[in-house]
């Protein structure tokens, strides 16, 4: 019978001083990070808005404060109630809120790489090996001749730690932190977009209600005209064709009144979806539009970079992509791993936790990739290309934001002038209708003149109601384009809920006044976060 022997040489006791020196050296090296430092991409910012009307109020420092529920400037209780429901039940916002919480968890996941990993293991085995002299198997399946039976019990702990020598972990954490802030801005953008869409849809419904009232009044007016024509026909002073024309005009107005209900129903259903309610159970009582756009202070163009969440999101994505370049470059350098394990191992369970059963190992491991056939070079090139892509996206987002503001400013300015002219057109058309109606009653003109005057007056009134609705929609669009009540400081206050974070204190507002003469220097985005991201090349 042969026996297998394993000889183990006991390692000498570790010395505290060399370990301390090694730990200090690793700590110093861990502060060295490779890769480019991030700087916000430059963009061309105009000094003022081209479409701003003369005398447009420039925002003062107090106007820059976090306004929170910006829709309250319209003083519409129904709109306020709908926005409150949206802020608690909108499913698109809930989707982005979950994405933000995921991004926040990824930051914690990345930070865990700074610390050692400790694992505990426990095992127990009983093993029977066949006899060296051979044996046979009986009918019951047992071994005919006795073999050796061994027991093994083991209780151990393993620890590994990889110091961040080249900043790979710190770059990853910075990238995930920027991703978290970008997700916060995405959430704010989804919230602002939904709030703005709700306000615009609400004013569209109110405009349709105003047009419905106009159509209903027109139907009543045309019914009177038909009655007048029928009376004149019965008296023999009007032709049968006049009656038919009056009937046709009345029926056309009735059809238009019915058709207006289709657009209103569709917009009402859209509001139901925005507030997270089935369209079948939601209804909005009719109420004609009687509001006028409030004064909205227009910040200088430079402030748009701090007030638009979509711009902040694009900028943070560029920052995250920049950090990934450092992560890719760090792969060129060797990795150092410290590992240690220890525990108890014995073939007798009662002797497991005794001094003779102890074992331990400790030592560093240095690993470096020598040949990878262009893998790391390709990964670095891909990271740089991704950064360039995000920079282009950021600049395009800034351009689109300025276009959005200019579009709504132009719309408000032009519609304001158009309303004045259209109101005069309505008055002129009504006066012409009154004159032609009196002439028709006196028999000096035929009914075709009345028909033409009625159609002109109706079209003028309908156009005026439509313009008033468009102006309110543009007003809400302008507030949305200017960022609503949002600012970049909210990225660090986001809690991942559907509702917006609480407004900031007044003391946190910028104190430098905005002057119409030119653009203010843009303050760095989220200075506190940017400081955490700044990692210098070594």
Image (tube, rainbow, N blue to C red):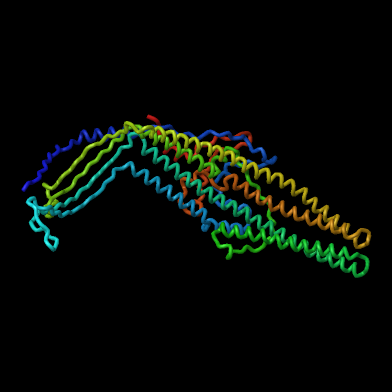
Along the viewing direction, whichever of 244 and 188 lies nearer the viewer:
244
Say left or right for 6 vs 389. left
Residue located 21% across and 44% down the image: 341
The picture places residue 167, in percent across and down from the top left corner, at 36, 35
Say left or right for 23 vs 205. left
Question: How many numbered tags mark residues here?
Answer: 0
The picture places residue 365, in percent across and down from the top left corner, at 25, 36
Residue located 15% across and 49% down the image: 345
The picture places residue 390, in percent across and down from the top left corner, at 50, 38
Q: Is residue 132 above or below residue 377?
A: below
Say left or right for 155 vs 451. left
Residue located 48% across and 41% down the image: 317
Q: Is residue 417 above or below residue 40?
A: below
Which picture quadrant has residue 240? bottom right
The picture places residue 360, in percent across and down from the top left corner, at 18, 43
Say left or right for 504 vs 6. right
**Residue farthest toward the left in the current orientation of the protein:** 1
* Image quarter (top left, top right, bottom left or bottom right) of the C terminus: top left
Along the viewing direction, whichever of 240 and 281 lies nearer the viewer:
240
**Residue farthest toward the top in the current orientation of the protein:** 538
């Amino acid at each position: 019978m042969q026996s297998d022997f394993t000889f183990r040489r006991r390692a000498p006791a570790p010395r505290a001083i060399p370990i301390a020196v090694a730990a200090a050296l690793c700590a110093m090296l861990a502060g060295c990070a490779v890769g480019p430092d991030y700087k916000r991409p430059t963009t061309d910012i105009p000094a003022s808005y081209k479409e701003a009307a003369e005398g447009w109020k420039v925002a003062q420092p107090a106007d820059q404060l976090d306004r929170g529920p910006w829709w309250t400037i319209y003083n519409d209780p129904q709109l306020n109630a709908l926005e409150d429901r949206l802020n608690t039940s909108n499913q698109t916002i809930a989707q982005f809120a979950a994405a933000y919480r995921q991004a926040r968890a990824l930051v914690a996941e990345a930070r865990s790489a700074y610390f050692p990993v400790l694992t505990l293991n426990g095992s127990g085995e009983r093993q029977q090996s066949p006899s060296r002299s051979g044996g046979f198997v009986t009918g019951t399946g047992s071994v005919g001749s006795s073999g050796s039976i061994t027991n093994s019990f083991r209780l151990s702990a393993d620890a590994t730690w990889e110091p961040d020598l080249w900043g790979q972990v710190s770059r990853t954490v910075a990238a995930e932190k920027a991703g978290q802030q970008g997700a916060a801005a995405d959430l704010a953008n989804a919230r602002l977009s939904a709030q703005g869409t709700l306000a615009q849809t609400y004013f569209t419904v109110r405009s349709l209600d105003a047009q419905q009232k106009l159509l209903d009044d027109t139907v009543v007016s045309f019914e009177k005209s038909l009655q007048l024509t029928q009376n004149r026909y019965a008296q023999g002073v009007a032709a049968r064709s006049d009656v038919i024309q009056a009937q046709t005009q009345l029926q056309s107005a009735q059809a238009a009144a019915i058709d207006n209900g289709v657009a209103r129903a569709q917009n009402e259903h859209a509001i139901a979806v925005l507030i997270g309610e089935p369209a079948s159970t939601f209804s909005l009582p009719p109420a004609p539009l009687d509001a006028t756009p409030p004064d909205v202070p227009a910040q200088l163009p430079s402030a748009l970079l701090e007030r638009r969440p979509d711009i902040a999101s694009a900028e943070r994505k560029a920052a995250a992509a920049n950090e990934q370049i450092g992560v890719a470059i760090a792969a060129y350098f060797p990795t150092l791993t410290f590992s240690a394990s220890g525990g108890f191992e014995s073939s007798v369970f009662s002797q497991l936790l005794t001094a003779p059963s102890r074992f331990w190992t400790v030592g560093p491991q240095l690993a470096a990739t020598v040949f990878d056939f262009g893998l790391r070079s390709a990964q670095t090139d891909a990271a740089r290309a991704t950064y360039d892509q995000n920079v282009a996206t950021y600049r395009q987002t800034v351009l689109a934001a300025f276009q959005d503001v200019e579009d709504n400013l132009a719309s408000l300015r032009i519609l304001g002038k158009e309303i004045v002219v259209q109101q005069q057109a309505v008055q002129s058309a009504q006066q012409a209708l009154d004159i032609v109606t009196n002439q028709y009653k006196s028999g000096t003109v035929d009914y075709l003149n009345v028909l033409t005057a009625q159609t002109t007056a109706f079209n003028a009134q309908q156009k005026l109601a439509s313009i008033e609705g468009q102006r309110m929609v543009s007003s809400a669009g302008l507030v949305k384009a200017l960022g609503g009540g949002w600012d970049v400081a909210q990225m660090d206050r986001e809690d991942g809920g559907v509702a917006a974070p609480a407004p900031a204190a007044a003391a946190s507002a910028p104190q430098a006044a905005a002057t119409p003469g030119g653009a203010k220097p843009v303050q760095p985005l989220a200075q506190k976060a940017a400081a955490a991201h700044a990692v210098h090349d070594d």
